[in-house]
Image (cartoon, helix red, strand yellow):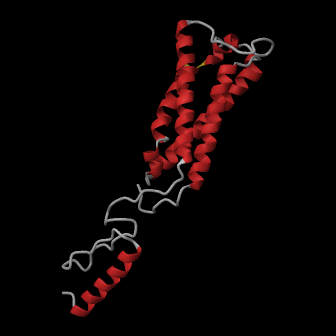
Amino acid sequence: MTSPRTAARRKRNLAVRSSVHPGLREEPAGDPGGPEPRAGGPVGRPRQVLTPRWPAWAGMVLCVAGLGLAAYLTDVHFQGAAPACPLSGGIVDCGAVVTSRWSAILGIPVPVLGLVFFAGMLPLQTPTAWRSPRRLVRWGRLGACAVGIGMILWLISAELFLIGKICIDCTTVHALTFALFCTTLFGTLATSPEPDWGA
């Protein structure tokens, strides 16, 4: 049983904390051993991570652009046609790249992999996802971008050393993937520290 002095002291401490952190609520009087209210909101409610706005908006723009270009290359692939290739000539030959044996990985066309990548990254780049305190969202987003970087490094190597030609459309997708990795990396570094109780 809580003594009047202890109850008064707890009430006074709660009043002080509430003035600094609005949103705290008093614990039930009959549960003196219950959990202390957290300073980020009501008891047990996850706190959102503080993050600047630019990573989400930049990420979504890059994902939409990459999604559109990957969709175009996927459509061209299944039609069996060569994509429009600006500056075609010399080392630049989009048709040679997209029809080479290196244009598929484990039987899956590279444009389809790009389509899946950008489609999967888009929901992870929304403002809601960026404010999520969950480690799975935070590090999964960055890890997926790192996988994308590894993929484009392999594809660039294949173009330069195995095919001997460069595809401008593919290079644009590579540039979008690299930019997405940079915005995700620096956006993650710019966010507030992750709550230690987050899942």
Q: Is residue 80 above or below residue 167?
A: above
> Does residue 13 appear left or right of residue 65 in this picture?
left
Quadrant of the frame with the N terminus: bottom left
Residue 191 appearing in the image = yes
The residue lying toward the viewer, choosing from 39 and 109, is 39
- Residue drawn 49% across the image and 57% down it: 50
Pick the front one: 7 or 20: 20
- In the picture, measured across the screen, residue 21 lies left or right of residue 105, that is left
Q: In the orientation shown, which residue stands out farthest toward the right?
A: 90
Q: Position of residue 171 (x, y in %)?
A: 68, 25
Check the image and report above or below for 45 versus 149. Answer: below
Q: Residue at x 64, y 37 (%)?
A: 179
Which quadrant of the structure image shows residue 170? top right
Give the total number of marks visible in the rendering: 0
User: Which image quarter holds the C terminus?
Assistant: bottom left
Of all residues, the one furthest to the bottom in this rendering is 5
- Front one among 142 and 157: 142
Of all residues, the one furthest to the top in this rendering is 80
- Compared across the picture, whether 121 is left or right of 3 comes to right
- Of 133 and 97, nearer the camera is 133
Q: Quadrant of residue 47?
A: bottom left
The residue shown at (61%, 33%) is 177
Residue 126 x %, y %: 46, 42
Q: Is residue 172 above or below residue 27?
A: above
Q: Is residue 106 visible from the viewing direction of this image?
A: no
Residue 69 location (% of width, % of height): 57, 22
Residue at 62% x, 27% y is 173
